[in-house]
Image: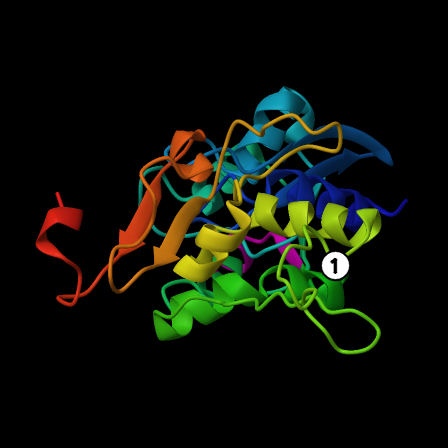
Amino acid sequence: MSHMRQALALARLALGTTSPNPAVGAVIVRDGVVVGEGFTQPPGHAHAEVMALQQAGRNSRDASLYVTLEPCCTYGRTPPCTQAIIAAGISEVHAAITDPNPRVNGKGLSELEATGIKVYRGDGEEEAREMYEAFARHVNTGLPFVTAKFAMSLDGKIATHTGDSKWVTGPLARGHVQEMRRTCDAIMVGVNTVLRDNPRLTARDRDGSLLSRQPLRVILDSKARTPTDAILLSEPGLTFIAVTRSAADGRIA
């Protein structure tokens, strides 16, 4: 596995846990040996580059950093990664893509180059662009990246004529849906799905256990018909029910 592919694999471990920050992977190599690696921690904690630098310690000096996204150069919950990279004595940085965030977008790499650090771009670019597609849309438009999930039988039906079918999809497709839930911020359904299927709308691991981080559950329910005993209301995590003025007074707290 190449060092950038290793960094991309690390970034995928953080997907779904870093919002609103992007999930980044970083690998530090010195004399052909990996001396540090890391991925983005939850908001307010260390970024991938800092995690890798901490693990590498003194071995960071004159080493190469492989990172899936251009290092940040702005102050937020944590200091800029560029300053940590410069202070550690990294000699060259390989970034898969520049940061699509207008606040960074090349400025981080330029800051590194200005101090004499060699900068390389483009290794792993295609996979990285796909990984950061949702992040890029949000930071450039302020809009969410929406994935629509549909399921139907070979004859084009989404349920039996009685509406009592539990699943149209098979185990592989359901496993893929859980992977999607793990990496998204919210799951949205209409109230009819709640009334007919009584879904949990949770994110689960391959063994069926609940993940520690659950996406926000959003129910579009103009008349506030969601039953108070709906199973999703007893699941871990938050549920947001969007209602309108057409909802009965007694149905709104």
Instruction: Answer whether residue 9 is visible to the viewer in this image.
Output: yes
Q: Is residue 1 left or right of residue 51?
A: right
Q: Position of residue 33 (x, y in %)?
A: 85, 31
Q: Is residue 142 above or below residue 34?
A: below
In front of the other: 121 or 200: 200
Magenta residues?
111-119
| Residue in view at x 47 percent, y 43 percent | 215
Q: Quadrant of the C terminus?
A: top left
Say which element carries label 1: loop
Q: Which residue is mark 1?
A: 168
Q: Is residue 197 left or right of residue 239?
A: right
Few, some or many C-alpha atoms within 10 Å of disc 1 (few <14, some 14-19, many ≥20)?
Answer: some
Question: Residue 56 falls in which quadrant of the image?
Answer: top right
Q: Is residue 120 above or below residue 240?
A: below
| Residue in view at x 40 percent, y 58 percent | 191
Instruction: Answer whether residue 186 is visible to the viewer in this image.
Output: no
Q: Position of residue 184 (x, y in %)?
A: 53, 51
Q: Is residue 79 left or right of residue 60?
A: left
| Residue in view at x 41 percent, y 29 percent | 234
Taking the view exactly as shown, the residue that stands out farthest to the left is 249
Q: Position of residue 211 (x, y in %)?
A: 58, 30
Tally of numbered tags: 1
In front of the other: 229 or 77: 229
Q: Quadrant of the N terminus?
A: top right
In front of the other: 192 or 238: 192
Chosen colour scheme: rainbow
